[in-house]
Image (spheres, rainbow, N blue to C red):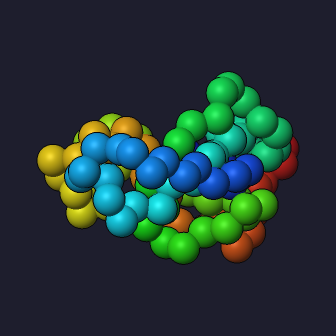
Amino acid sequence: MHIGRIIGTVVATRKDERLTGCKLMLTQPLNIEQSPIGEPLVAVDTVGSGIGEVVIYTKGTAARYAADKIQSPIDASIVGIVDHMDIQKE
């Protein structure tokens, strides 16, 4: 699983029919300090997240299972909304 921040929504009127009904969110991966890393990705929202929220997302086969769409072309799914993170500093 990975941590990211929702930075936008994606609307695609024309898309693979297996994605019909999926809410698509633009997700910026974050490091442990919650700083952006890498390129944003499109993830299927399974938990009702919104712009600005920090989320947990998964990629690959686990993403299709999380969205309950095993035969869909889903590469990433949002599976949780982070309330807070406790990190032990040395």
Give the quadrant of residue 53.
bottom right
Residue at 28%, 44% in the rendered image: 16
Give the quadrant of residue 74.
top left
Seen from the viewer's position, the closer of residues 34 and 50 is 50
Residue at 43%, 67% in the rendered image: 46
Q: Where is residue 4 in the image (x, y as percent from the top left)?
A: 65, 48
Is residue 40 depicted above or below 45 in this figure?
above
Q: How many labels does the image show?
A: 0
Q: In which quarter of the image is the C terminus?
A: top right
Seen from the viewer's position, the closer of residues 34 and 28 is 28
Q: Can residue 62 be seen in this view?
A: no
The reply, left or right, for residue 69 in relation to residue 32 is: left
The reply, left or right, for residue 52 in relation to residue 46 is: right
Q: Where is residue 51 in the image (x, y as percent from the top left)?
A: 73, 62
Name, please, the residue furthest toward the left.
71
Name, please, the residue furthest toward the front.
14
Residue at 70%, 52% in the rendered image: 8
The reply, left or right, for residue 49 in relation to residue 19 is: right
Is residue 50 depicted above or below 88 in this figure?
below
Q: Is residue 31 visible?
A: yes
Q: Where is residue 49 in the image (x, y as percent from the top left)?
A: 60, 69
Q: Position of residue 70 (x, y in %)?
A: 18, 52
Seen from the viewer's position, the closer of residues 41 and 16 is 16
